[in-house]
Image (cartoon, coloured by chain):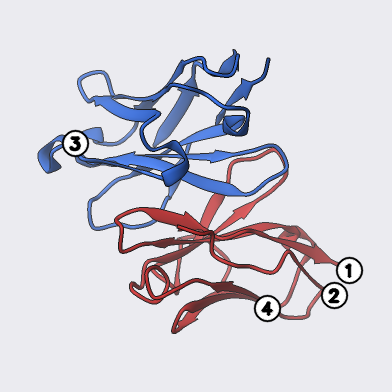
Chain colours: A red, B blue
Amino acid sequence: QSALTQPASVSGSPGQSITISCTGTSSDVGSYDYVSWYQQYPGKAPKLIIYDVKNRLSGVSNRFTGSKSGNTASLTISGLQAEDEADYYCNSYTTETTYVFGTGTRVTVL
Amino acid sequence: EVELVESGGGSVKPGGSLRVSCTTSGFNIDKAYMNWVRQAPGKGLEWVGRIKSKSDGETTDYAEPVRGRFSISRDDSKDIVYLQMNSLKSEDTGVYYCIAVRFSDWFFFDYWGQGTLVSVSS
């Protein structure tokens, strides 16, 4: 099971919107609406922000939006803020009853 | 409050074995599917494996790189989950996180431990 493909880095200015893509296959992202997104700050454990493609965890800002089309899922951060600077990972359940993470994206706020 | 605390990490030589533990509290572990995820230094997250609940047969699944070398077990009476790692390789080095998926129809990781560092080096 190969890792899902994410851009290595995405950057934006405060207030702008950015989108992180997560491309898989028909065996993972394309098969289920079980895509989740995690935010990780340096030296910290990851935190769930989006589950089941588009559901925000309670307490997560509505600036975070998840979506999916075919084999590609996306995370959009609108109104970019300095605190959004972190690493982001997607994850999907697979047809092999395993999970696979994305390669990870470093978000930089300019 | 849900809490997961990993322990047992440390340094081991290639080919060696190590068992790390995850002590849980604040939720009913009986129903939970317990997962392990690792992160090599400076690298991304990698799912390692999962053990289902006792009522679902304690079935295990593993990622291909660790299949046949790692095994996950659980002791619900002690609220503990174990990750037994054998035939360790340098590429197994990283922080190992324990994760609870509290219900069988959930497919996301909402509670993570703080992680325990495993270093495989000669």
When the figure is inspected, residue A21 is found, relative to residue B79, above or below; the finding is below
Amino acid at circle 3: Glu
Give residue A71's position: percent from left, percent from top: 46, 79
Callout 2: residue from which chain?
A
Q: CA distance from mark 1 to mark 3?
A: 48 Å
Residue A110: give its label.
1
Q: Nearer the viewer, mark 3 or mark 2?
A: 3
Give me the disc on residue B58.
3
Give the residue number, with chain letter if any, for mark 2. A13
From the viewer's side, name the closer residue of B21 and B48: B48
Pointer 4 residue:
A78
Give me the residue at 39% from left, 75% from top.
Answer: A26
CA distance for labels 2 and 4: 11 Å
Q: Is residue B120 above or below residue B35?
A: above
Number of numbered discs overlaid on the protein picture: 4
Measured Cα–Cα span from mark 2 to mark 1? 5 Å
